[in-house]
Image (cartoon, helix red, strand yellow):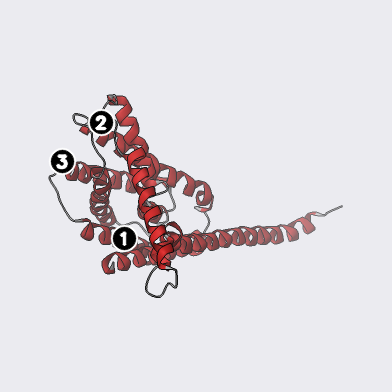
């Protein structure tokens, strides 16, 4: 039979192995994030092979490149016609539902930059209370700027907004690494960045063919869809990483590596959007 002394000796060993197992699983998740980071940067190449292979040094046959380009343009036109143009006979509720779905689709899976910003906010804290406060401020800000831009009160070119959005993600991610505790001024920064992201949402929203007399239902539906997409991101992140909030190694093994990956991707996007 196992004596009390043997039990006391075994317990630290079990605790040590449990810690190692959790750390190993967390590292595997960090590796998965790295793989996703690479895929995110390669997505344009997978979606539009002619962009990557039909350049001066691509080596592809010009006729094949021309055919790929025409096919891509035809597909884009079909998507625009079938999914984005609004039926003028749609009811108020039907129109709001249409734009609600468009808002969700704009985040999942299309809004990778907005997803990374929400994840950067997620990895900044270890409690859901401060996380909820940050998300609420971000939501309030981008809802306000989305409405103002859609009404024509604010008009900033996408060539300025898009690089700044990417830079804002990098800023928050780097701040996660540099600062351990949430500061009051971070809330002001998040609100400002929320205004910026709202201008990005507005660029997509205003590209839609809005039916006359349905502006507000379109705007409200789209905004709710965006929020549902963001909430989905937070819920998935919470299910994956929320269990480890209370562990002392969470920041070192989870939050910092994840923030580094987010900072790298968003910095790459910022440079790419300025150059291209």
Q: Residue at x 35, y 52 (%)?
A: 73
Spatial separation of the CA atoms under disc 1 and disc 2 = 29 Å
Q: Quick one: quadrant of the C terminus?
A: bottom left
Q: CA distance from mark 2 to mark 3?
A: 13 Å
Tell me: 10 left or right of 122: right
Of the two numbered discs 2 and 3 on the same chain, state the one appearing first in sequence.
3
Residue 1 image position (x, y, % from top left)? 87, 52
Residue behind mark 1:
166
SS label for mark 2? helix
Residue 108 appearing in the image: yes
Instruction: Using the image as rendered, state which of residue 114 and residue 185 is in the foreground.
Output: 114
| Rendering coords of residue 164 (x, y %) | 25, 60
Q: Residues within 10 Å of mark 3 (few under 14, many from 20)?
A: few
Residue at horizontal 18%, vertical 56%?
A: 157
215 sits to left or right of 104: left
Q: Are marks 3 and 1 in contact (CB under 8 Å)?
A: no
Give the residue at x 29% y 34%.
86
Could you tell me if the residues under marks 2 and 3 are in contact, i.e. CB atoms within 8 Å?
no
Residue tagged 3: 151
Name the secondary structure under disc 3. Answer: loop
Task: Determine the image quadrant of residue 212.
Answer: top left
Is residue 12 shown above or below 133?
below
- Looking at marks 3 and 1 on the same chain, the residue that comes earlier in the sequence is marked by 3
Q: Is residue 190 above or below residue 13?
A: above
Would residue 121 be seen by someone viewing this image from the given angle? no
Assign a secondary structure to mark 1. Answer: helix
Name the foreground residue: 109 vs 120: 109
Please identify the residue farthest to the bottom as the structure is shown: 57
Q: Nearer the viewer, residue 128 or 199?
A: 199
Task: Work out how far the residue at label 3 is from the one at label 1, CA to CA, in angstroms.
Answer: 24 Å
- Residue 217, label in figure: 2
* Residue with the most extreme right position: 1
């Amino acid at each position: 039979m196992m004596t009390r002394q043997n039990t006391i000796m075994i317990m630290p060993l079990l605790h040590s192995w449990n810690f190692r197992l959790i750390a190993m699983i967390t590292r595997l998740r960090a590796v998965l994030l790295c793989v996703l980071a690479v895929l995110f940067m390669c997505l344009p190449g997978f979606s539009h092979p002619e962009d990557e292979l039909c350049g001066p040094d691509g080596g592809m046959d010009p006729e094949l490149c021309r055919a790929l380009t025409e096919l891509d343009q035809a597909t884009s036109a079909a998507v625009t016609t079938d999914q984005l143009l609004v039926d003028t006979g749609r009811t108020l509720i039907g129109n709001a539902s249409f734009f609600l779905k468009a808002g969700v689709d704009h985040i999942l899976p299309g809004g990778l930059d907005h997803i990374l910003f929400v994840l950067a906010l997620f990895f900044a804290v270890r409690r859901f209370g401060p996380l909820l406060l940050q998300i609420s401020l971000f939501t309030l800000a981008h809802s306000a700027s989305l409405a103002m831009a859609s009404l024509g009160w604010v008009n900033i070119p996408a060539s300025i907004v898009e690089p700044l959005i990417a830079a804002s993600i990098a800023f928050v991610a780097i701040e996660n690494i540099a600062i351990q505790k949430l500061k009051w001024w971070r809330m002001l920064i998040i609100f400002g960045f929320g205004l910026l992201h709202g201008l990005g949402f507005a660029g997509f929203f205003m590209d839609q063919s809005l039916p006359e007399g349905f502006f507000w239902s379109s705007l409200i539906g789209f905004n709710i869809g965006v929020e549902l997409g963001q909430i989905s991101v937070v819920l998935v992140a919470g299910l994956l990483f929320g269990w480890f909030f209370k562990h002392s190694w969470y920041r070192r093994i989870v939050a910092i590596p994840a923030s580094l990956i987010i900072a790298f991707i968003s910095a790459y996007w910022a440079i790419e959007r300025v150059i291209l």
